[in-house]
Amino acid sequence: MKRLLIVALSVFALAVAQVGLQAQAKMKSMTASGTVKSVSGSQLVVTGGGKDWTFAVDNGTKFVGKGLGTKSKAGAMTATDAVHEGDKVSVTYHDMGGTMHAASVRITSKGMMKK
C-alpha cells in the first residue's frame, strides 16, 4: 500500500511538471535590437528597424552589460539604473496578454551622455 502511494504521487508530480513545461514552451521568446528612445521604471522604448518597440520592465527583467554586475551588488537594479537614452540594446521578450514583457536587456554599447 505504501509503495502504491509513493508511485501514485511520483506519477502525479511528473504530470504536473509536464504541464508546466508545456506552458513555458508556448511562451515563445523573441528578440529586438535598437536604440533606447526612453526608459522609466516600468517601460523601455526602443527604436529599431524604422519603428518603436515598447517593452514592459519589472523586477524580473534582467539587465546585462559591462559594469552592471558591480551596480547590482548595491541592491535591486531598476531599468533607469541600467539603461539610458541613446544606449544600443538587444531585448529578449515574450508576449504576455498583448504586452511585450522584457525578460532580459543586453546593453551592447553605451550612448553619448547628454550635458
Image: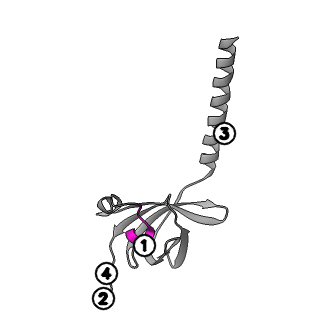
For label 1, the residue is 80
Label 3: which secondary element = helix
> Which residue is found at the position 70% from the left and 11% from the top?
1
Q: Which mark is residue 113?
A: none
Residue 31, image x, y percentages: 50, 62
Q: Sequence order check: which comes first, mark 4 or mark 3?
A: 3
Which residue in the rendered view is the most extreme toward the bottom? 115
Residue 91, image x, y percentages: 47, 64
Amino acid marked by disc 3:
Val
> Which residue is found at the position 41% from the left and 68% from the top?
89
- Other-residue count near label 2 (Cα within 10 Å), few / some / many at <14 / 14–19 / ≥20: few
Gap between marks 2 and 4 measured at Cα: 9 Å
Label 1: which secondary element = helix
Amino acid marked by disc 4:
Met
> Which residue is found at the position 39% from the left and 70% from the top?
81
For label 2, the residue is 115
Looking at this view, is 75 or 95 the one in front?
75
Q: Sequence order check: which comes first, mark 1 or mark 4?
A: 1
Magenta stretch bounds: 76-82
Gap between marks 3 and 2 measured at Cα: 52 Å
**Residue 96 figure quarter:** bottom right
- Residue 37 relative to residue 97: left or right: left
Are the residues flagged by discs 1 and 4 in contact, CB closer than 8 Å? no
Amino acid marked by disc 1:
Thr
Q: Nearer the viewer's eye, disc 3 or disc 1? A: 1
Q: Which mark is residue 112?
A: 4
Q: Sequence order check: which comes first, mark 3 or mark 1?
A: 3
Q: Which mark is residue 19?
A: 3
- Other-residue count near label 1 (Cα within 10 Å), few / some / many at <14 / 14–19 / ≥20: some
**Residue 84 figure quarter:** bottom left
Amino acid marked by disc 2:
Lys
